[in-house]
Image: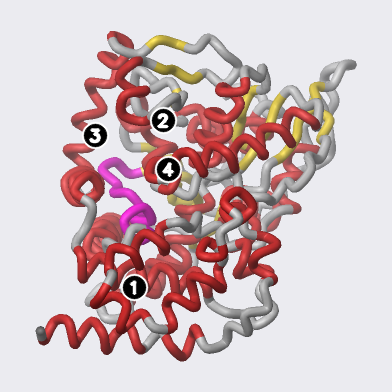
Amino acid sequence: MSNVLKLAHALKKLDDKIVKCMRCGTCQSVCPVFAESLAEGDVTRGKLALLANLSQKILTDAQGVRNRLERCLLCGSCQSACPSGVSILEIFMEARALCTEYLGLNPIKKIIFQQLLCRPKLFSFLMLFTPLSKLVMSSDKNAQNTVCSPLIKLAMGERHIPAMPSKTFTQKYGVINIKAKDSKPTVLFFPGCMGDKVYVSTTEACLKIFKHHGVGVEIPTNMSCCGIPALASGDVKSFKTMLKQNVEILKNKNFDYIVTACASCTETIKDFWREHSAEMDCKNDVAKISEKAIDINDFLVNILKVDLTPHTQSSKKTKITYHDSCHLKKSLGIWKEPRALLNANGNYELVEMKDADRCCGCGGSFTLTHYDLSKKIGNKKQQNIQNSNAEVVAMGCPACMMQVSNSLALAGNSISVKHVAEIYAETLPNN
């Protein structure tokens, strides 16, 4: 009973944050989940109303509370539009953590977070067997380079997933440690799980960019996940484990910036690491690391100040459109820089799609636990991409790349999906 009372007391601490909500309904107009379900409970104000009495409701219907909270993409659309400045994402993640503490973690998530993501060496070892996936997966032979199989359909419905590379970036290149030229900065590049194990071409593009501009770069091996999947699911314990593992590797490194090509990783290292290390022994090391975190787009345009003059190499330009990843635009405020980098490649003509900053429907594990909703939201995004008449869609988040690729593959579109770094890297000579 003492644990229950402790939990109820912790829930009441959310009241000061929740009380700022005026129930104005602005969140309703921007919520991608509500746009599909039309259920008041899916609107932010509906969830906040639920949380207002959470200390009582979690004792009577804890699973119901969790179910409502999990019907959220954590895209931040409501928070960025909220006239009262309610810290909605912070409130929802704290509430999810409290629900997890009370109910425990989903068994599948428990295995993924605690046995896989918290054990990077095991994760890397298991990736040695990815070539065997070709035995059970067949290529969709599409522009998105996705694969599908009966096993995928059995576990995840009609989803199309990215084709796995034969080797991860770490397996292919090992430790990267290149000295800076002249007075150029040195970066520690954090590839993230997707950049190391799935979208290797994105990490290769970033490495090419760094080399071309004389930037010193180090990419260590055995880095853990940044932790955002665990944190978003309320598993704070696993999140802190990954945080500590990464800090042990990073704290003695000498670098000017820690750069990522994943907006979610950037926000996590920059904000969530610092917030959740306040009572940890490593908090001083975390503070030094977090203040150096920066997205690749921001780094290239505002720190390195690369030449953005278009160099046309083809008389016929390829139309390209851009999807604003939620964490990149709404959380980090970066939206001009990616477009500037795309325009720097004169072989492309940038055409804006409708609602470029509307969520693609991924939301991390949301796309697995609420696939039907995720697919509907993703379908609207792919329709906007298709209506732009672009041949390529670029973005700055690997999770978005995976979701958009699935949406385009389901619709049978021939539009390819690229990271902004890949498009910019095309303008540079091969090393």
Tell which of 77 and 69 is nearer to you. 69
Magenta segment, which residues?
220-232
Image quadrant assignment for residue 315: top right
The residue where tag 1 is placed is 276
| Residue 323 higher or lower than 49, as above or below | above
Residue ID at (50%, 52%)? 259
Counting residues from the start of the chain, the first of labels 4 and 2 encountered is 4
Q: Is residue 102 magenta?
A: no
Q: State the separation of the CA atoms marked 4 and 3.
A: 14 Å
Q: State the separation of the CA atoms marked 4 and 2.
A: 10 Å
Disc 3 to disc 1: CB gap under 8 Å: no
Q: Is residue 224 magenta?
A: yes
x and y percentages locating residue 129 in the rendered image: 23, 21
The residue where tag 4 is placed is 191
The residue where tag 3 is placed is 124
Image quadrant assignment for residue 152: top left
Left or right side of 13 for 322: right
